[in-house]
Amino acid sequence: MEWIYDCRNLDEVREQIDRLDRAIVSLIAERGLYLQQAAGFKPGSAPEEDGKRIDQVMRRVSRLSGELGADAALTAKIYRTMIGHFVERERQLRLQPPGVAS
């Protein structure tokens, strides 16, 4: 990590964790919005293409984990869960009749 605030007590540690939680949740929400856009560009996407993209993302995330000093196993687990959720959400949107709000 390039810069980590040197906390002086537990309250400061918790403040930093709360700040990060807000940023993480915000980024998850943003990622989801981009994935909704992506779904519109691939209405008939083949499962093997989705699998290739998932593999590509997982390799990139694994590399980033090493570069940034993150726990690789935890990062992979989080991403597999997140990707699984978004794939299912995309599937639901495709099955939804036109004009029905989600």
Image (cartoon, rainbow, N blue to C red):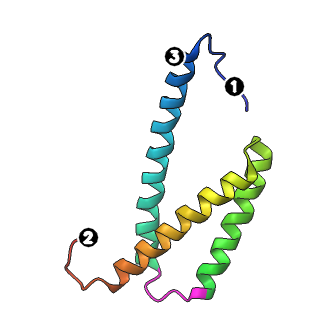
**Furthest-front residue in this view:** 10
The residue that label 1 is drawn on is 3
Disc 3 marks which amino acid? Asp
Q: Nearer the viewer, mark 3 or mark 2?
A: 3
- Image location (x, y in percent) of residue 55: 70, 72
Mark 3–mark 1 Cα distance, whole angstroms, equals 19 Å
The residue that label 3 is drawn on is 11
Disc 2 marks which amino acid? Ser
Mark 3–mark 2 Cα distance, whole angstroms, equals 40 Å
The quarter in which the N terminus is drawn is top right
Disc 1 marks which amino acid? Trp
Q: Which residue does the image show at 48% across and 30% down from the upper left?
A: 18
Q: Is residue 51 left or right of residue 92?
A: right
Magenta residues, start to end: 42-47
What SS does tag 1 mark? loop
- Image location (x, y in percent) of residue 49: 61, 84
Q: Residues within 10 Å of mark 1 (few under 14, many from 20)?
A: few
Q: Residue 54: which disc? A: none
